């Protein structure tokens, strides 16, 4: 499969972000903690150069906690402030405003020396579709300022949100990038739901996920689905179909239904806390 999804509104959104960046003190990037590398738009590094950076590891409750810590340390080593949150439940959100002030401490001090007092920090909030950007903004603001949804592409335009006298946020649409150089990145984004499901083959996603889980989290599939983890990924998928009663006439496996079940179990956290890539695998701009 060739994973691509770049609607016309994303081109317009990127152009608008390039115009707005001159107004910004801080770039807050919302990423999915289950795929911290793959859920980062590489265009953001170029867009946000010379700006303070805050990386939000969202949905950290669904990700492996050891990997959360490893990724937080990796981003900090690369010059970014970080925070682990679950924007939906509010976990980790109380410290965000303090972290924003800390990230912009040099800017605030420069303003003070120039006699500029009480100018709010202006932060652009960016992220790929379905990373939880709008939920993060609404939870931080304590009210429904941004549209939310569990499908990518809900936010279509930009809007300014004043949190308080110290912080203003610029919400932006979630944007992918025109071409995935590494198709594995596209596959991982499909697994977490950042590419519309209508564009995908669920069986391919499920079999990749099964293969990854068997290697990285041995015993997990056996515990969840009562299947043996020997054999091919397809054989394991067929075993899950058998154990979950996903069958067609003639007792044949219902592959699409079984695949959708496995992917949804992952997305919802029913399979446990899982991270699909670690910082040690980042080589030459790719996460294996």
Image (spheres, rainbow, N blue to C red):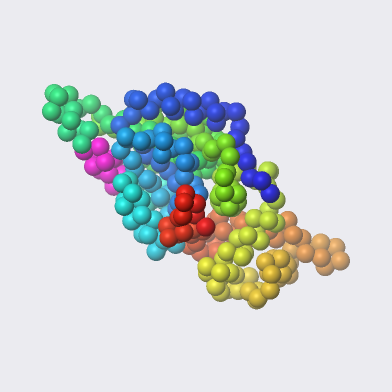
Asked which quadrant contains residue 195, the reply is top right
x, y (%) of residue 184? 58, 52
Q: Is residue 269 above or below residue 19?
A: below
Q: Main secondary structure of the magenta part?
A: helix
Q: Residue at x 62, y 64 (%)?
A: 210
x, y (%) of residue 98? 25, 43
Q: Residue at x 55, y 35 (%)?
A: 154
Relative to residue 119, is residue 210 drawn left or right? right
Find the magenta span and give its range: 94-105
Residue 279 seen in the current view: yes
193 or 25: nearer the viewer: 25
Relative to residue 195, is residue 100 drawn left or right? left
164 or 275: nearer the viewer: 275
x, y (%) of residue 70? 37, 59
Q: Is residue 96 magenta?
A: yes
The image shows a total of numbered marks equal to 0
Asked which quadrant contains residue 177, the reply is top right
71 or 136: nearer the viewer: 71
Q: Is residue 35 magenta?
A: no
Residue 161 seen in the current view: no
- Most extreme residue toward the right, as rendered? 250
Q: Residue at x 55, y 28 (%)?
A: 11
- Most extreme residue toward the front, as rendered? 284
Q: Residue at x 72, y 69 (%)?
A: 235
x, y (%) of residue 278? 45, 59
């Amino acid at each position: 499969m060739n994973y691509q999804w770049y609607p016309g509104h994303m081109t317009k959104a990127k152009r608008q972000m390039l115009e707005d960046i001159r107004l910004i003190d801080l770039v807050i990037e919302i990423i999915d903690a289950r795929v911290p590398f793959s859920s980062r738009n590489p265009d953001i590094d170029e867009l946000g150069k010379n700006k303070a950076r805050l990386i939000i590891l969202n949905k950290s409750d669904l990700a492996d906690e050891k990997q959360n810590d490893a990724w937080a340390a990796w981003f900090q080593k690369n010059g970014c402030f970080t925070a682990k949150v679950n924007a939906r439940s509010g976990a980790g959100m109380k410290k965000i405003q303090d972290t924003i002030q800390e990230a912009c401490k040099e800017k605030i001090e420069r303003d003070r020396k120039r006699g500029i007092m009480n100018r709010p920090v202006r932060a652009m909030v960016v992220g790929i579709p379905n990373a939880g950007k709008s939920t993060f903004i609404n939870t931080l603001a304590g009210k429904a300022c941004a549209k939310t949804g569990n499908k990518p592409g809900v936010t279509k335009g930009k809007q300014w949100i004043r949190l308080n006298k110290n912080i203003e946020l610029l919400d932006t649409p979630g944007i992918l990038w025109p071409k995935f150089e590494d198709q594995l990145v596209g596959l991982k984004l499909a697994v977490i739901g950042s590419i519309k499901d209508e564009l995908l083959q669920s069986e391919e996603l499920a079999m990749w996920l099964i293969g990854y889980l068997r290697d990285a989290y041995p015993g997990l599939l056996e515990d969840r689905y009562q299947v043996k983890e020997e054999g091919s990924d397809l054989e394991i998928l067929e075993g899950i179909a058998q154990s979950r009663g996903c069958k067609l006439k003639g007792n044949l496996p219902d592959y699409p239904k079984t695949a959708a079940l496995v992917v949804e179990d992952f997305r919802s956290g029913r399979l446990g806390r899982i991270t699909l890539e670690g910082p040690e695998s980042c080589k030459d701009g790719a996460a294996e």
